[in-house]
Image (spheres, grey):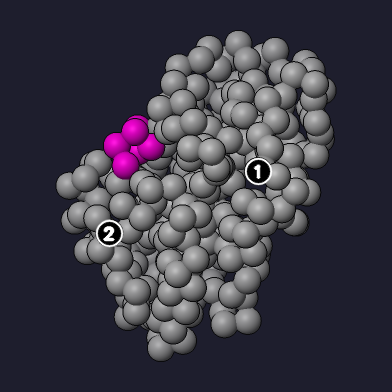
Amino acid sequence: MSLTAMLQEQFDAGLTTRSDFTIDQPVEQYGAVDHAVWQQLYERQTAMLPGRVCDAFMEGIRALDMDARRVPEFERLNEKLMAATGWQVVAVPGLVPDEVFFDHLANRRFPATWWMRRPDQLDYLQEPDCFHDVFGHVPLLANPVFADFMQAYGKAGTVAQSLGALPLLARLYWYTVEFGLMRDGDGLRIYGAGIVSSRGETEFSLTSREPNRIGFSLERVLRTQYRIDTFQQTYFVIDDFAQLFDAMRADLPALFKAFAEQPSFDANARRAEDTQILLPA
C-alpha cells in the first residue's frame, strides 16, 4: 500500500494524522479479532523464546508488563517505558518517511503501527504491524544501552540522509535491530525484532546450517545487501549491545563516502576476512 493510500485509509477511518505522522492510538477500533490475533501471536512467541532470545528482551517484557490478551494501550505502556529509559511509543498509520522516522528515534520516540494483521497473516506480513512493532521492538527499548544505541541511530539517519547514504545506513538497522543475533556463552541468542516476532525465523536463524553467520563488523554490514522476501541468508552476531552503541561513534560520513564508491556484497556473500560463527557439531 502506498503512503498516500495508507493516509487516505486512516482519514476514512476517522483518524487524524499530524505533521509528524503520529495519530492518537484508536483503541476503540480494535475488535475481538484484533485482540485474538495479538493473544495468539503473543502466547506462541513467548512460549518458544525463552532460551532462544537474549535475556534483555524477556526482562523488557516483564518490566513493561505487556498484556498477553489484548493489544497494548500505548499510553499505559509508556508509563513504564518512560520510567525505564525515557522512551515512548507513538502510534503511526504505518511506514513513515525516512526523515520523520529518524527524527522520532533521535528524540527517543518509537513510531509503532497501530493496526493488527489479519488471522490469515499470522506467519507472514510484508510490512510491519502492531505486533511486530510493539512486541518485537519495544521490550529492548527498556534496556538502557540498546535504548541509547537507537537514539544514536536516529541522529545518524539525519547525517546519512544529507549525504545520500540512506541505503547504507538502512543495512545497519536491518542486520541488527531487525535481524540481529547475539553471542551467549557457546551459543547464540536472537534479539532482532524481525526474528523475535517470527516463529519460523526464530528456529531458522538459530539452528539451520544454511545461512551465513558473521561476527559483527560495521564496515561489513554497511556493504552487505539484504533481501526482504525470504529468511535471511546472512546474520551478523554481536557480543553485546555496547558493541552497537560503540559502532555509532565511528566516522560515519567517511565510511559513507568510501563505500559509495565501492561495490556492495551480495546478501549471501562469504568473505575470507569474515569471522564465521559456526553452530556446534
Disc 1 is placed on an element classified as loop
- Which badge, 1 or 2, is on the more N-terminal residue? 2
Quarter of the figure with the C terminus: top right
Percent across and percent down for residue 166 are 62, 32
Q: Nearer the viewer, residue 224 or 46?
A: 46
The alpha-carbon separation of the residues under discs 1 and 2 comes to 31 Å
Badge 2 amino acid: Arg
Q: Residue at x 25, y 41 (%)?
A: 85
Q: Which circle marks residue 280 in the picture?
A: 1
Q: Which residue is mark 2?
A: 62
Q: Nearer the viewer, mark 1 or mark 2?
A: 1
Residue at the front extreme of this rendering: 281
Q: Nearer the viewer, residue 167 or 240?
A: 240
Magenta span contains residue 50: no
Chain part drawn in magenta: 143-148
Left or right of residue 5, residue 229 in this image: right
Q: Is residue 102 visible?
A: yes
Percent across and percent down for residue 134 are 41, 60
